Amino acid sequence: MEWQKAVVPGCDQNGIPVLSVIAKLTYDICQGKVSVSDNQLPLVEADRYCDPSMMLHSEIAEETDLVAFKPSTDVVVAAKACAPAGKCACCFECIVEAGPLHKTVKVYGKRKVFVGAFGRLGFRAPLPFSEMELGYREAYGGFARDKYGVMHVYPPNPIGKGFCFRGASIEPESIEIPRIEDPLSPVTPETLMISGPQKWNSAPGAVSLGWTRRDFYPRYTYAGLSVLKIDKTDRVDQKGIFVADPRFFQGASEGLWGKELAGDEHVRLTNLNSQYSVFEFSLPGQVPVMTLDVGEGRKELWPKLQTVIIDMKEMHLSMVWRGAMEYGGINEMKKFRKVEAIVQ
């Protein structure tokens, strides 16, 4: 067993400079069982896109592991929606439960829009299906022209589908209905179209189970400087330099972050595996022992679970831990006689 590790400088939630040891271990998973994998995945050094040739419109395949601080644990699930009992279905729910974190999405077969009496929109019945890819491209969002021909994007999910305006020059039958929706904010014939660009927050919610993009709302608002003005949400360090709110580094979908996991929680996945409608296992509870030596002797660090990645396609579980030590900032690193991290 060999931990993949790196030392990353950054800041904590209070803007204090920290040196963080990032350690990753990959496990094989099957129903009710987790074991250390013979194939240890390396640390992801930079975001990777599903379609590198179309990065502005692509899902995120992997987000970098080299994050010095996250306020809570990200739980990210890469999976297909699988109809119960291996049969076909027109719609069903996919559920992720990981300790205190819980997320439900509803998935549909392909649907079409039709125009009924008095010009009212309706949805035809969804077609049955057995499996479908989960991702934000199948959720509500995208971009559309308003009645004046001006292009707008849906801030929570610019890569989705279905976003459109009433009165715009568009054939309703050509609108792609999202196949993934939030049960608490569903896509209906009444909510599909919005009255104007300023009403985007009344549109259906955009949901998935995997990585969000950094340009999704509200994530981009945590980047350190407000888009239109400086306000009380902006964070400034002691030198007056804008710094990112740590929530910017939370890459999991809404509902799958916000709590700090201990690493031994029970996981229950519903309709995300073709063999088992309910797939369960427990996180292994294997907490690393971390030390960092910058030339002044070894200092033991307190590990925090930063990211849990459940890959139901490859049947892998990766757990990324962080141990942090405060220091005087980048200029102080010039004085370090060495930087040696040990993870066991």
Image (cartoon, helix red, strand yellow):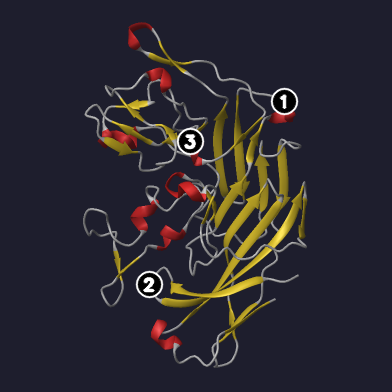
Q: Residue at x 71, y 64 (%)?
A: 40
Q: Residue at x 39, y 51 (%)?
A: 215
- Measuring from the top left, give residue 116's x and y in whole percent: 40, 9
- Above or below, 121 against 60 in this view is above
Residue where numbered disc 2 is placed? 15
Please state which of residues 180 and 301 is positioned toward the viewer in this rendering: 180
Q: Residue at x 49, y 34 (%)?
A: 182
- Above or below, 119 against 313 in this view is above
Total marks shown come to 3
Q: Residue at x 37, y 6 (%)?
A: 117
Callout 3 secondary element = loop
- Above or below, 292 against 302 in this view is below
- Measuring from the top left, give residue 16's x and y in whole percent: 40, 76
Residue where numbered disc 1 is placed? 87
Q: Amino acid at mark 1?
A: Lys
Structural crowding at the residue carrying mark 2, measured as other residues with C-alpha within 10 Å and reported as few (<14), some (14–19) or many (≥20): some
Left or right of 86 on screen, residue 94: left
Q: Quadrant of residue 238?
A: bottom left
Callout 2 secondary element = loop
